[in-house]
Amino acid sequence: MNNQKSHWEHVYETKNPDQVSWTQEKPQTSIDFIISCGLEKEAKIIDIGGGDSNLVDFLLEEGYENITVLDISSKALEKAKERLGTAAEKVQWIATDITEFTPTETYDIWHDRAAFHFLTTPEQVSKYIDIAKKNITGCLIIGTFSKNGPTKCSGLDIKQYDEESLSHVFGNDFEKVKCITEDHTTPFGTTQNFVFCNFKKRS
């Protein structure tokens, strides 16, 4: 088991949503960006590093039918499945490290809030970009800690981004549609500044 995987399995085994900084009651920004892609409810959506995030609940509520949640931690996915109950059967669940992901289908919408910034080496970043560009047909929505955000999360180093650096990383294959920064208030009442960008696959 790689170190990243054992780290995240431990986090999700030992902590509840109100004990981790990334929890959002309702991930409104992510939902808004996904809806702004303007795709049908049959659009294939993947949530990268989705863990036990509530995003999937709201997407099902919005009527989206083809949702996949990928996370390195199988424990996180188990928690999400338990929360959803029978609705979990409508979702595809994939437990893998994103840099080792070999998709069997393409995705109309690729959403990643706070997974990409854990990739701190050029090799990890280029693997991610390679997988994304081969397997995204429409929107790439990505949220990371901004240059005004934390430098660590869950005890791990992260890589900060801003609109310019995210556009630089993905710009060869994706065209920037919109970027925003926003403050996320953690369950402990602290603030983390995020940058969120929506990109469109270049044809």
Image (cartoon, rainbow, N blue to C red):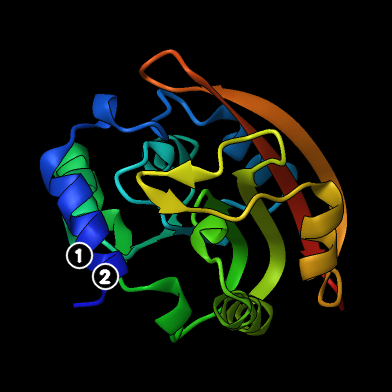
Out of 79 and 190, give the one closest to the viewer. 190
Asked whether, in this view, residue 171 is left or right of residue 81, the answer is: right
Residue 170 spot, x, y in % from top left: 77, 68
- In percent of width and height, residue 151 lies at 56, 44
Q: Is residue 152 left or right of residue 4?
A: right
Residue 12 seen in the figure: yes
What residue do we see at 42% from left, 57% from top?
49
Residue located 44% across and 22% down the image: 186
x and y, in percent, of residue 139 in the image? 71, 60
Q: Is residue 36 above or below residue 200?
A: above
Residue 86 seen in this snapshot: no
Type of amino acid under label 1? Ser
* Residue for badge 1: 6
Within 10 angstroms of label 2, few (less than 14), some, or many (20 or more) residues?
few
The kind of secondary structure element at disc 1 is: helix
Please tell me whether residue 14 is drawn above or below residue 188 in the rendered image. Answer: below
Q: In front here: 127 or 104?
A: 127
Residue most extreme to the top:
189
Label 1 close to label 2 by CB (< 8 Å): yes
Instruction: Provide residue 171's location: percent of width, then percent of height.
Output: 85, 69
Quarter of the figure that contains the N terminus: bottom left
Q: Which residue is at 24% across, 58% downward?
A: 7
Location of residue 159 by image quarter = bottom right
133 sits to left or right of 83? right
The crowding category of the residue bearing disc 1, from other C-alpha atoms within 10 Å (few below 14, some 14 to 19, many at least 20), is few
Q: How many marks?
A: 2
Above or below, comparing residue 169 to residue 118 in the picture: below
